[in-house]
Image (cartoon, coloured by chain):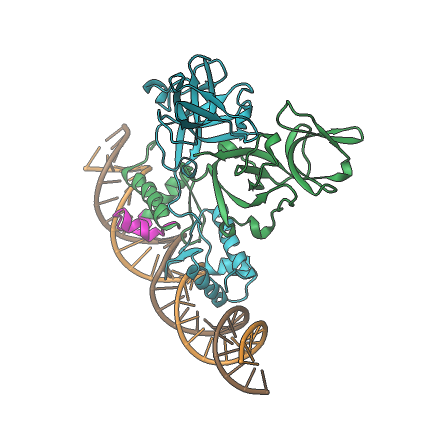
Chain colours: A cyan, B green, C brown, D orange
Amino acid sequence: MKVLSIKQQCIIDFIHRFLGDRGYPPTVRDILSGCGISSTSVVAYNLAILEKKGYLSRHPEISRGIELLTRTPGSSSRVQVPIIGQIAAGEAIPVPTPDTWDVTAAADTLEVTEDLTRGKGGLYALKVKGLSMVDALINDGDIVLMQHVSVVENGEMAAVWLKSEKEATLKKVYVEPGRIRLQPANSQMQPIYVEPDNVEIQGRVIAVIRQVA
Amino acid sequence: MKVLSIKQQCIIDFIHRFLGDRGYPPTVRDILSGCGISSTSVVAYNLAILEKKGYLSRHPEISRGIELLTRTPGSSSRVQVPIIGQIAAGEAIPVPTPDTWDVTAAADTLEVTEDLTRGKGGLYALKVKGLSMVDALINDGDIVLMQHVSVVENGEMAAVWLKSEKEATLKKVYVEPGRIRLQPANSQMQPIYVEPDNVEIQGRVIAVIRQVA
DNA sequence: ATTATATTAGAACAACCGTTCTTTTATATC
DNA sequence: GATATAAAAGAACGGTTGTTCTAATATAAT
């Protein structure tokens, strides 16, 4: 009783297709012919089971009153993130300003769903130029989704600016007595130790998105 | 005659709200009470106008057969991709079946925007387990967005199954005379050469998503 | 085999709902 | 005002559609 029967799977799938095709839900008799079922009562019977299992919601006495419930309710909304520049070795990370903040004014925007941002604010995106971040498993052309913070927790991946080296890099940051340890994401590589005065946190990495094809 | 009348605007708005609230379109009489209209024929009259103007599509003789044509932002450009399993060295890549295809039946889904999928079909996602893909700049826990194809163009990143080695890996595929060259994404690493009979294309990589924080 | 439970069949009812027709009222154009 | 067009009102017809009832059949457990 835990899994859906073949028939129930077909019903869910059919409603899904029907809704996508026509824009309105099917009737009991639509499902009947669509799934090769021979009686409306059988459809009603299986719909009742599907509702009890939480796959859909029915509105009694209402024609086509079938509502498909998405697996993740409270459907996540979309967020427009401005791509405010590039990140490359030897260049400063462009810090977001009120101007560049404006999504409409940004040169390009990235559209992400909220299950990626998890409700975080102060987001911006950078396009990675060059191979200077390969030790963080970040390739040329990747897009890094960032949150503009100046303090990060231990072990978080962050964009740090090394003042004396004049170099921006993405590393995991660990604060240790008298020094800061920068750990590449690739665990096979050795960490770098720098003086606290030499580092400036530019933001923390929320996600990395690489579009291949 | 160019603009919509107050009543017509109300109808469009009401259908929109109704659809969002209940998941199925309203009846003529729903619109009647919802917009304070006093006769079904008035609703029919205005619906005919709205259809002629291209705001909606009606399906004759079909209850609730109203389809809003103005693409509701957030609905048309989002795609639910089923995360159908893991990919790891020494394990076969789970090929999508009609069962696992169904979004509602999938254990977990990834919601992406269409500017990432670019209208592609046959999409599924895999969660990367382990560090066997680091040479492709893919980390443990990354999510790989895949398209289910069996043939790829030269230079495309694909999930390939090496039969004799019993190993799944992500590489750029180049067909060369008498052999197939598998090029790691990290250009600093050396390519691998394998026999054509030994490889099986499982799908091409569309994007890689890494959630860090 | 027997019993209990799950599923299927068929039919019929009653309300739902799109359509259409005629009549009335409003709005514009001259 | 006269006329034409647009919009609304009201009612009725008929197919649609969810529901429900009874009976039959399948499946599983003991």
Q: Residue at x 49, y 17 (%)?
A: A88
Where residue A131 appears, as percent x and y from the top left, is 56, 20
Task: Assess whether residue B26 is covered by the magenta stretch.
Answer: yes
Q: Does the rendering let one see residue A146?
A: no
Chain part drawn in magenta: B24-42
Where residue A188 appears, as percent x and y from the top left, is 57, 30
Task: Assess whether residue A74 is covered by the magenta stretch.
Answer: no
Horizontal side, residue B155 vs residue A19: left or right: right
* For residue A196, above or below residue B172: above
Q: Does the rendering let one see residue A173?
A: yes
* For residue A188, above or below residue A37: above
Q: Residue at x 55, y 22 (%)?
A: A140
Q: Quadrant of residue D16?
A: bottom left
Q: Nearer the viewer, residue A28 or B85?
A: B85
* For residue D15, above or below residue C14: above
Q: Nearer the viewer, residue A135 or A92?
A: A135
Q: Nearer the viewer, residue A100 or B133?
A: B133
Where residue D29 appears, as percent x and y from the top left, is 54, 76
Q: How many marks?
A: 0
> Dividing the image into 4 quarters, which one contains the N terminus of chain B?
top left
Q: Residue at x 64, y 22 (%)?
A: B188
Q: Residue furthest right?
A: B178
Where residue A59 appears, as percent x and y from the top left, is 37, 58
Q: Residue at x 53, y 57 (%)?
A: A9
> Dividing the image into 4 quarters, which one contains the C terminus of chain B?
top left
Horizontal side, residue B202 vs residue A135: left or right: right
Q: Nearer the viewer, residue A71 or B66?
A: A71
